Image (cartoon, helix red, strand yellow):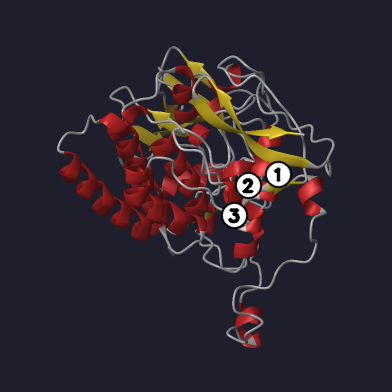
Amino acid sequence: MENSGLPETRQGHSEARPNYFFLPPELQRMDDAIPDPPGFEQGLLTAEYVQSMKPTPTEFDDVELPETGPGFFDEDSGTWRKPVTTNEENIYRKLDESHPRILAFQGVAEADIDDYLVLEYHSNSDLWTYLLNNVLPPLSTRIRWALEIAEGIAYLHSKSIVWTDPHLSNVLITKDMHVVLADFAYAVVSPDFWHEFVTMPPPVFTCPRGFLGMTPNRIDIFGFGVILYVLVNGRFPWFGNLNPSWEEQLHIYIDAHDKMKWDTIDDEKVEERFGGIVQKCFTIEYTDGGEMFNELKQVCATWFLEEGEEENDHSTVIASRAPAEDQVIQTTSIAGERNTQPGSSSPSRDVTNIGQENNLTKKEDQGVKEMSLLK
């Protein structure tokens, strides 16, 4: 798949740049034994229950991954064209094309070599690109985007569909500055609790392995927790800005999330209102997107009622409060510094130097307290 540098890989339409996370060997080698589901050692799960939860075949075992470019803008029709895969076409046909939070599917266009999905085009780019290349929008706007993303996930789950690829680049900004969910190439219909998902989102959005055996919606719920954290906090968990490299994302996954260590929101007032939902997403306390959306909707209503106006002083807060010393986690992964300004290179997938001793420490950078990976 074509995947050039940043921001080139985060320009235009996210359908052009799928960012699937196939579990790298470094993570596959870590703790090869699958952890028992919560409650197993205490006898809370019976042998019959465990036997009934055997993995089911995926819906797309026979689908070939597209080797051609992942998509292009068709100037004649003003639509986005993406090579057809059976699974993604089937997913789109299960969804309501007029749902306001789902990228509109307009059919299939036949061509001499490949057939293409015809999708609505949004020139405002994806959410990750937008956040990296523009002044951080007011908190009210970012909260609204989070609520709309949750609404889209709730709709998918109501159709028994797990998105499986929840991250900022798969959220598109419409011309009227709302958002829609996109990219369902690896979505799964009605997976059971022990379903073996074959792909993951980028590492920082990936649900830890310790939650295996809980609701299959956990993939989307955890990923949304990271999205919500980023939108209300202006940075990624355990990181000082919006642009962690691939190696730095692996740090966060291996040394924090996979060890059940959760970062908190910097602004105390925002943490008080939204931190509980973020933590419940991180610890998979929701069974589906509907529960998550309904609680977030109530919290948002209270927030705006208390604030009085949607535009408020919290809209420009970015990592204003450094984590406490006991929140600084120890890492045993990759060291790496990189230019984090827009225009720097895209996250690398060449994972090296696993096992070096490093610390996730604090540093000052242009008035922003960042969490940086240093030796």
* Above or below, comparing residue 306 to residue 161 in the picture: above
Q: Residues within 10 Å of mark 1 (few under 14, many from 20)?
A: few
> Dot 2: what SS?
loop
Which percent across, then down, holds residue 237? 54, 42
Do the numbered discs 3 and 1 sit on residues whose CB atoms are within 8 Å? no
Q: Nearer the viewer, residue 80 or 238?
A: 238
Distance (Cα) linking label 3 and label 1: 23 Å
x 59%, y 63%: residue: 211
Residue underneath mark 2: 200
Position of residue 142 in the picture relative to residue 257 (left or right): left
Of label 3 and label 1, which has the lower sequence position?
A: 1
Taking the image as drawn, is residue 305 in sight?
yes
Q: Residue furthest front?
A: 325
Do the numbered discs 1 and 2 sit on residues whose CB atoms are within 8 Å? yes
> Dot 3: what SS?
loop
Q: Residues within 10 Å of mark 3 (few under 14, many from 20)?
A: some
| Disc 3 residue type (three-letter) | Lys
Q: Nearer the viewer, residue 209 or 60?
A: 209
Which percent across, then down, holds residue 290? 35, 58
Q: Nearer the viewer, mark 3 or mark 1?
A: 3
Distance (Cα) linking label 2 and label 3: 20 Å
Of label 2 and label 3, which has the lower sequence position?
A: 2
Residue underneath mark 3: 261
The C terminus appears in which quarter of the rendering?
top right
| Disc 1 residue type (three-letter) | Phe
Residue underneath mark 1: 22
| Disc 2 residue type (three-letter) | Met
Q: Write down the quadrant of residue 371 in the picture.
A: top right
> Dot 1: what SS?
loop
